[in-house]
Amino acid sequence: MIDIPKSKAAEFLPIVNFFAIKGKAINIEPFGSGHINDTYKICTDLEKGPNYMLQRVNNHVFKNVEHLMQNVALVCNHIREKLIGLNEANVDGKVLTPIPTKEGKLFFKDERNNYWRVFILIENTKSYDMVETVQQAREGGRAFGNFQAMLSDLNPHDVHEVIPNFLNIASRLRDFKEATNKNMANRIEEVQSEIDFILERENKMNTILNMAAKSQIPLRITHNDTKFNNVLLNGDDKVQCVIDLDTVMPGYVAYDFGDAIRTIINSAAEDEIDLDKIKLNIPLFEAYTKGYLEAAYHFLYPMEINSLVDGVLLLPYMQMIRFLTDYLNGDTYYKINHPTHNLQRTRAQMRLVIEIEKKEELLRDIVKKEANVYLS
Ligand code: ADP
Ligand code: GN1
Ligand code: MG
């Protein structure tokens, strides 16, 4: 999708007024660092009223925005009811609030076929691209554990599969092989060692799908994009709200655990160019695991706990495949900052897989130790 230049943001201010916001939108600024949607912060003329987030949904990635917004509304309402039941004082600060259009729709489609939606802006919060402290990691674990727990009484088939086979490794490998066969951008020669690396691990990465095929782990509603900047923390670094609900779909808990750890355990950025900076931060892994199990232990089956580290191995591997597939296809999916950005991301994820493989046993021991707390 073509990125909208920052200077053009002002053009989109009038779009907000199609939505049932309080007050009048008077200021717009680009916001956040996501790879898929365009996000803007909107201020209104009301001193005390809420401010808002305007997002252009990437409809190249999300083909059915109506289904996507039905999922978002279902999940937000379900969590909202749970929070009200718990007498939570600040419900609007703890769950996303989609604002309908003045005609009662969950999104607005403009004349250029752009899809827009608005949420209440959750003030005084921060999202981090990289985790800095053990407390942040533990809070992140609590946030996503609690998120899964609150949705664990919904039927996974009540949500649409907005991107079919989104985290299905067999399907991702098929797309990757197709990309190597087509070699659309004529880049295959420079990535031969990365291709070999992927193919060598193909069979080993099937554990979660195999467990699922044997009905050893249940299908649940999962977030499916649990990188750390999709949780908002407050000024004291306490968990406030899980955001970016576009990929909420049926899935396995290990996917969410693995994707969160992918960003948390890495001492460098997702696209770090200096591969030697990519090291594992084990205390942050331990803290996330603690927080996650605190919130999720009560609904998890033992086999799901056993599967968590399989997710930790799988998700960076799958992310490497996704970045490399996009690079081979000529960068049609992720936003990029320069022509080899997807290659740089691929190599950084590959190094992360290598580092995680070296520490697999240690990670399994930590999960066992943290889970044992609940057995004694
Ligand atoms: P993307 O799909 O592009 O990652 P997100 O929904 O994650 O989009 O939003 C991008 C960024 O905007 C987030 O990382 C966060 O910093 C900020 N953000 C998103 N929604 C809210 C909200 N309701 N309140 C405050 N900040 C938000
Ligand atoms: C995308 O939208 P964002 O930046 O939170 C992607 C995730 C990837 C992530 C990698 C819909 O997430 O699946 O893990 O980039 N979202 C989609 O950073 O593909
Ligand atoms: Mg995001």
Image (cartoon, rainbow, N blue to C red):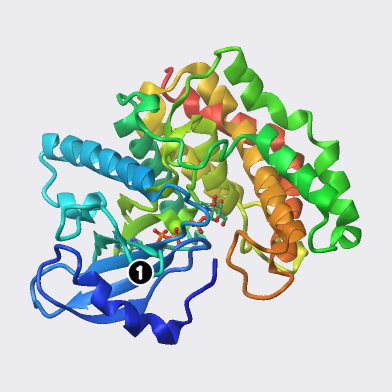
Q: Nearer the viewer, residue 100 or 241?
A: 100
Q: Position of residue 34 (x, y in %)?
A: 48, 63
- Give the side of residue 204 with respect to residue 165, left or right: right
Q: Is residue 284 visible?
A: yes
Instruction: Give the amino acid type for the residue marked by disc 1 in the picture.
Output: Glu
* Residue at disc 1, secondary structure: loop
Q: Nearer the viewer, residue 287 or 36?
A: 36
Residue 308's image quarter? top right
- Give the side of residue 334 with respect to residue 236, left or right: right
Q: Residue furthest front?
A: 111
Q: Position of residue 98 (x, y in %)?
A: 24, 54
Query: Which residue is disc 1 drawn over?
Result: 111
Check disc 1: other Cα within 10 Å, few if <14, some if 14-19, many if 20+.
Answer: few
In the rendered image, the quadrant that contains the C terminus is: top left
> Residue at the spot x=39%, y=50% of the render?
65
Q: Nearer the viewer, residue 324 or 227?
A: 324
Residue 120 against residue 213 in the figure, above or below: below
Q: Position of residue 238 (x, y in %)?
A: 31, 54
Q: Nearer the viewer, residue 261 or 246?
A: 246
- Give the side of residue 354 with respect to residue 95, left or right: right
Q: Position of residue 249 (x, y in %)?
A: 44, 36
For the image shown, how many numbered marks are present on the structure?
Answer: 1
> Residue at the spot x=34%, y=23% of the render?
155
> Residue at the spot x=73%, y=69% of the render?
273
Residue 87 against residue 301 in the figure, above or below: below
> Residue at the spot x=76%, y=54% of the render?
351
